[in-house]
């Protein structure tokens, strides 16, 4: 028998879990425990249930463009592989390490129709990822797109190697003009700060080898500005001749590295995708790790990634409250998998909703007029969150846990 106000095996009502999920997405787990007056284990239990619910309810829709990248999670070259939907900007899969098996675990759970629907995969030049894509995705030779930013990273490192070599030679002669100029050579011409422009022009004129390497790097950036495959190939040939005849060993090595992967560099003109979305998600993941001061449990880290970056529907199945537009929308969305309940069967929840409102207002010492609806809409704060923010502003040393309801 399913209760109309709670899910099976749940320790809290659906309305309370709904409020807790909104708070967990806006604050840390510890902050949510203070506001809701629950333990850390209870808050994390709500989060894990939400993630399991979201992954189960996630639509089996085909993903057209994928981004695959790794994110460092600890010292000692410890990584996680993150697969994201480039168009939706959401995390689709998280796996341990950055091996071929890490990406295989994602493709193996897709249906043949979903695999055939993949049109492009943006990835860095990491061979295990490429092998996994070639093994599972149909016609993958023309769908792998090596990310332009990773390619430019290799070329930028080659420019810095040239700078280091020239700096060592000049330092032995007592010339330290290149000292402290590392990041000037990594700027694009249009991004160079105005305050450094005069010095940079002087450095280019004096340091011939580093200046030449920088010019080669800037010329390669123009490759991705072309609109067609043919013109891009023409520019590549001219650039490759220049780089390999520059008499700069690091630039020659970078040019040969790109040549070995050239066909999947030029597939950019067919799909025009990059790993910028993946890098943005990785930045958010590192922010989560920093806010939590690290995760000792890998499964907890994965749950946090899915919760904050998965964009699934984590809200408990709607209870059918008649005056709740969110419930109506969610019920319509999930009608295929779970039929909506009648309003009559959910009338007992009206009383629960009113009790929850009273609890929120009392626990936050309501002294101003705020909306009574405890449900987060868009980017607005929930009333309990807004009121706690006001209390913190007025009483910086006062804890919400110690606040007493007004009589």
Image (cartoon, helix red, strand yellow):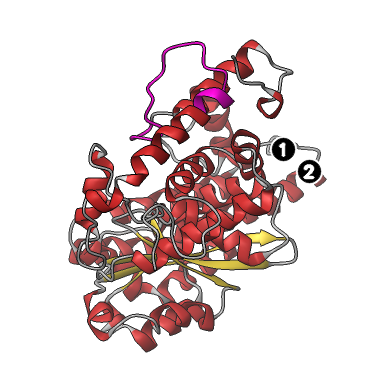
Q: Position of residue 77 (x, y in %)?
A: 69, 67
Magenta residue check for 362:
yes
| Corner quadrant of residue 341 | bottom left
Q: Position of residue 97 (x, y in %)?
A: 60, 73
| Corner quadrant of residue 352 | top left
**Label 1 close to label 2 by CB (< 8 Å):** yes
Q: Secondary structure at mark 1?
A: loop
Quadrant location of the C terminus in the rendered image: top right
Q: Secondary structure at mark 2?
A: helix
Q: Residue at x 61, y 14 (%)?
A: 393
Task: Identify the mark at residue 179; answer none if there is no mark.
Answer: 1
Task: Identify the mark at residue 171; answer none if there is no mark.
Answer: 2
Mark 2: few, some, or many residues within 10 Å (few <14, many ≥20)? some
Taking depth in this image into account, of 298 and 16 the one nearest to the observer is: 16
Decide if residue 15 is on the left or right side of residue 250.
left
Could you tell me if residue 103 is visible in this image? yes
Q: Residue at x 63, y 19 (%)?
A: 392
* Bounds of the magenta segment: 360-379
Tell me: residue 81, above or below residue 199: below
Decide if residue 48 is on the left or right side of residue 344.
right
Taking depth in this image into account, of 160 and 18 the one nearest to the observer is: 18
| Corner quadrant of residue 365 | top right
Quadrant location of the N terminus in the rendered image: bottom left
Q: Main secondary structure of the magenta part?
A: loop
Tag nearer the camera, 1 or 2: 1
Could you tell me if residue 195 is visible in this image? no
Taking depth in this image into account, of 109 and 326 the one nearest to the observer is: 326
Q: Position of residue 289 (x, y in %)?
A: 64, 50
Mark 1: few, some, or many residues within 10 Å (few <14, many ≥20)? few
Taking depth in this image into account, of 407 and 59 the one nearest to the observer is: 407
Q: Residue at x 52, y 30 (%)?
A: 359
Magenta residue check for 284:
no
């Amino acid at each position: 028998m399913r209760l109309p106000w709670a899910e099976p095996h749940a320790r809290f009502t659906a309305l309370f879990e709904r409020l807790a999920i909104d708070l967990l997405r806006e604050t840390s787990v510890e902050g949510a425990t203070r506001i809701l007056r629950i333990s850390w284990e209870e808050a994390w239990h709500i989060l894990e249930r939400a993630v399991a619910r979201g992954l189960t309810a996630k639509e089996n829709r085909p993903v057209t463009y994928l981004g695959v990248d790794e994110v460092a999670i600890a010292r000692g070259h410890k990584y996680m592989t993150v697969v994201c939907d480039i168009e939706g900007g959401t995390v689709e899969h998280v796996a341990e390490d950055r091996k071929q098996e890490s990406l295989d675990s994602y493709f193996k759970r897709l249906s043949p129709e979903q695999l055939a629907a993949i049109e492009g995969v943006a990835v860095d030049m990491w061979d295990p990822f490429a092998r996994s894509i070639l093994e599972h995705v149909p016609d993958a030779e023309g769908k792998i797109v090596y990310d332009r930013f990773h390619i430019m990273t290799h070329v930028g490192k080659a420019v810095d190697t040239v700078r280091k070599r020239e700096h060592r030679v000049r330092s032995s002669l007592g010339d330290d003009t290149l000292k402290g100029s590392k990041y000037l050579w990594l700027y694009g011409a249009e991004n160079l700060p105005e305050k450094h422009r005069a010095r940079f022009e002087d450095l280019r004129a004096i340091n011939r080898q580093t200046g030449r390497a920088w010019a080669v790097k800037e010329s390669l950036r123009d490759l991705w500005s072309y609109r067609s495959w043919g013109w891009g190939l023409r520019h590549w040939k001219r650039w490759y001749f220049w780089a390999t005849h520059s008499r700069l060993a690091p630039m020659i090595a970078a040019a040969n590295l790109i040549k070995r992967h050239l066909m999947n560099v030029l597939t950019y003109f067919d799909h025009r995708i990059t790993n910028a979305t993946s890098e943005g998600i990785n930045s958010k993941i590192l922010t989560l790790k920093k806010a939590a001061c690290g995760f000792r449990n890998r499964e907890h880290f994965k749950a946090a990634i899915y919760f904050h970056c998965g964009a699934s529907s984590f809200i408990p199945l709607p209870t059918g409250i008649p005056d709740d537009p969110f419930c109506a929308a969610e019920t319509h969305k999930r009608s295929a998998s779970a039929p909506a309940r009648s309003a009559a069967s959910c009338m007992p929840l009206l009383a629960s909703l009113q009790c929850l409102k009273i609890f929120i207002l009392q626990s936050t010492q309501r002294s101003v007029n705020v909306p009574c609806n405890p449900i987060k809409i868009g980017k607005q704060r929930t009333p309990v969150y807004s009121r706690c923010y006001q209390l913190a502003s007025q009483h910086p040393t006062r804890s919400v846990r110690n606040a007493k309801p007004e009589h």
